[in-house]
Structure formats: structure tokens, C-alpha cells
Image (tube, rainbow, N blue to C red):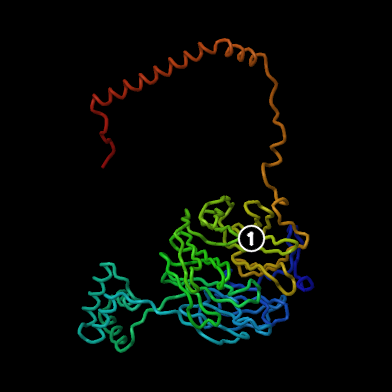
Amino acid sequence: MLGTAAKSSIPRKDGPWLHAWHDPVASIKAKSECVRLVDLNGDSSNILLVADERDKKMRVYKGTSVVSEHQLLDQPVSMCVFYTSDSSSSTPAIGIAGGPYVFIYRHLRPYFKFTLPFVDLDPQDESIWAEMDSGNVDAEAGWQMLQQARDSGAVMSSWSLDLLSMEDEMARAQYVAGKRGVEHKQHTVVTCMETLRKDTDAEDAVSSLVIGTENNQVLILDPSGAKVICHASLPSTPSILAVTGLYDIEWRIVVACRDGKLYTIKSGEMKGQAVVQGTVIELETQPNALARIEKSIYVTTMDAQLSCYHIKGRKLFSVALPAPATCTGVAKISRSRVVEALIVSLANGEVRLYNGKHLIHVMQFDDVVVAMRWGQMGREQNSCAFIGRSGSLTLKMMSRQANLEKSGADSGPPAEQDVPLRVPKKTKLYVEQSEREVDNAIHMHRVFQRDLCKLRLTTARSYVKIITSGEAGVSTGGG
């Protein structure tokens, strides 16, 4: 149990949270997408997996200690855990995205590498490189042709961008010579990744990887992770995915893109068909975190706003945060009924718990939380791992008596509203003034109307004087 190995120094009142463990020198640099809680050995005791961006290693935490570290083959972008078969004895596979590849691990060992499909080259770019490869065009002429193609709006490949960035003529000639005889292919890279369950909504259900790529594509792989079984094209590059549903029945993917908009991809009428819905949610600023709870989409933006939208695109509410959000997570607690709450970490060190738009609790950290993952840690069902900006690692557990219902939150008007104001007593002068206004109401109204008409007449005369004197429309500012 986590509580037996706790290193907490000073007990704090954390509301529904129970402090389990804190390591200020864990030296972890990771995003929420690279932190997972998983039952790796099939013993119903989950471990913590972290894909560290600093040293490109996968760390395995069991309890409060690091049991192993594994060197990664590329800079991790996202890490997902998925099951490839429905056998009771099967262990989950780990998919780590980096560059144009998804490295799949089994039993913490490299097993398979999936390469993203190549991007179609622009016809102008492809023809220019074909001419340079055949020797019909030299490097200098090809460089000029690529400049013209870029100015005309052609999409440049990585080869062309590298060549155009070179200023030395000799270096350009050597670069073109080195590409002769090499097949011209354009890679893309992974920007985000999640999982989509196949036919049942269980933790150990067979699932598929959902990948967002730099060339505006969203790909769904088969459970083995070897081929693409469904894809969709978007107007912009996807950056965050929120996946719900089952692939064999009905599924929906909410995608936050770099153009500041939310797009929705859902299953089509035929299996393997993806449809991009026409409803697009346009945000005021760039999104930095996305979560899906039931039929609501929660998104935090860089202007310190927490907004909630219905899946149909209608805005439900917006909450102003005291600081910009750094990451979000969904706390799902199953008791007599399932309760889902939103965990939001802020740049001022706060971690807030929301049920809808109702604020349940605020917890203050000594460090800014930049990554979190809710789930089972060890044998404790309701746990959450927090990673700080300085590299610290904190484990919290949700109390079994915690009330996350809206009724337990401070909702509605504040209590101060019921406190009567200290109104001063009416003076004799106030009473006489009130009586005078009642007795002379008609006369006072006529005086007001007369003064208002005089003001309008004076304004009109001044305007006519300005026009007739030629002063209107003349700029007096210095050029």
C-alpha cells in the first residue's frame, strides 16, 4: 500500500484528497500524455509508467520505487497502453510515439515499430527533384526553380526546405549530389495519440491506437498496431484528442487543432468509415487541455478560461480561472453511482476539482503541476499521480468519504447575500426632499425636458458652425 511507504513531511488539509507520497527530486519531465497507470503483470496491482522527455527513458514505478528504466528510441510525444487480444492471460502492449514511428513494447521490451504512411508530394516539388536526379537540371537551377515553386504556393518537402535554407552554392551542390539515387519520400510525425476500445468498455478490452499526424490526418490502427483501418482528414493539425465510444458500435473523437478550433470525427454508416461533422467549435484563444465527460466537452484555453460545450456545439458555460491552466484530468469514481469530476491544474500551483461548473475543492501545491494521471495505483482504485514543473512526483488518493456531488459544492449566491445591509435612518431633510419631489413632479419633469432641448439645440448650432467654417474633416496631426 502507498500509505505504508509515505514520505509526507507536514500533514495538510487536502479536503477529499489523502496525501500518499511525494518525491521532490524525481527529476521527471513529461506531459500528461506520457504518464499512464496500468496493470502490467495481470495481478490487479497497477504500476506507474512515465516516458521521460529529458533523458528519453521509460520509468516504471511500483509503489514508491523505480523498479526499472528503459531507454527509448526517440523523443516521446505520447504513450498509450492497449490490449491486442481478449485472452484473460494477455498482458497489455505499450505504444510510444516518437517522430514518424510508434514503438510498441511487450513485457517492457521493443516488439514492433509502426511507420506512419508517407505524405503525397507536391507535383511541382517532385518534378524538380526528378529533373535534378536525372542530371537535366543542376543544383543552382533547381534551387531557383524551388524558390519559384515556393512563391507560387507549392507545398515544399523536407528536402526542398533544407536546400532552400542553404546559402552556400557549394553546399547546395553537395546536398543535391548526396540525394541522387535516393527515393524521394516525405515523412510526417505524430502529434498526439490515444486509444479506442473495440467492442466492450472494460479496462482490459481490446483497443486500437488513434494517432494524430502533422499532415492534418487522424488515423485508427488495428488492435495489433500494424495497419491503418480508418482515417480522416482535418483542415488543421491535431494537437489534443478526446476519444469515446466503441469502434464496433459507435465512436466519437473530439480533436483540438492548432487553428484554435474543435472538430468532431464520428463513425460513419459503414464500419471503417469516419465522418468529420460540420459543427465546428471556434475558441477565442488556443486550447491547452481537453477532456470529455458524458455529453460535455471541457476545454481550457490560454486566456485562463474553462469552457464547456455540448457535443452538438452549443456552449453551456464558461468559468474564469485565477491563472492559466496547465493540464486537466477526469476523476471517475464508481460507487452506488458513477461520478465524474474534472481536475484542473493552474499555473499558480492550484489544483481545482470541478463537478460541472461547481467548484468542489481547491488544493495548493508547492510546485506547478504540468502532468497528471487518474486511475488505480497499486490496489487503490481512486489515485492520481501529479508531476511538477521542477520534476517532482506526488501521489494522492481520493478519500472514500469524499463527496463530489454538486450538492456538496458551494453553489448559488454567496452566504453574504442573506446578511442585511446597514441602511442609515431617514433624516428630516431626506423626508422633506421626498415630499417636494412628489408635490412638484410635473414641474420638475418639464424643466428637465426644457434643459434637454436647449442642450440639443446648442449642440446642433455648434455642429453647423463647424461645417460652415470648413473646420470639419481637416486633420491637424503631423505627418
Which residue is outermost to the bottom? 181
Of residues 380 and 224, the one nearer the viewer is 224
Image position of 410 with respect to 76: above or below? above
Q: List x then y, in percent, for residue 106.
A: 60, 85
Vertical relation: 386 (above or below) 349: below
Residue at 45% across / 63% down in the picture? 258
Which residue sits furthest right?
4
Residue 80 percent across, percent down from the top left: 58, 75
Report whether residue 460 is seen: yes
- Three-letter amino acid code at the position of disc 1: Ile
Q: Is residue 145 left or right of residue 72?
A: left
Residue 316: x and y, percent?
A: 56, 51
Residue 292, located in which quarter of the rendered image?
bottom right
Q: Is residue 82 depicted above or below 327 in this figure? A: below
Element under label 1?
strand
Return the residue found at the far front.
269
Of residue 298 and residue 390, the one placed in the foreground of this image is 298
Residue annotated with mark 1: 343
Quadrant of the snapshot with the N terminus: bottom right
Callout count: 1
Q: Is residue 27 visible?
A: no
Q: On the picture, is 327 further left or further right than 258?
A: right
Image quarter of residue 455: top left
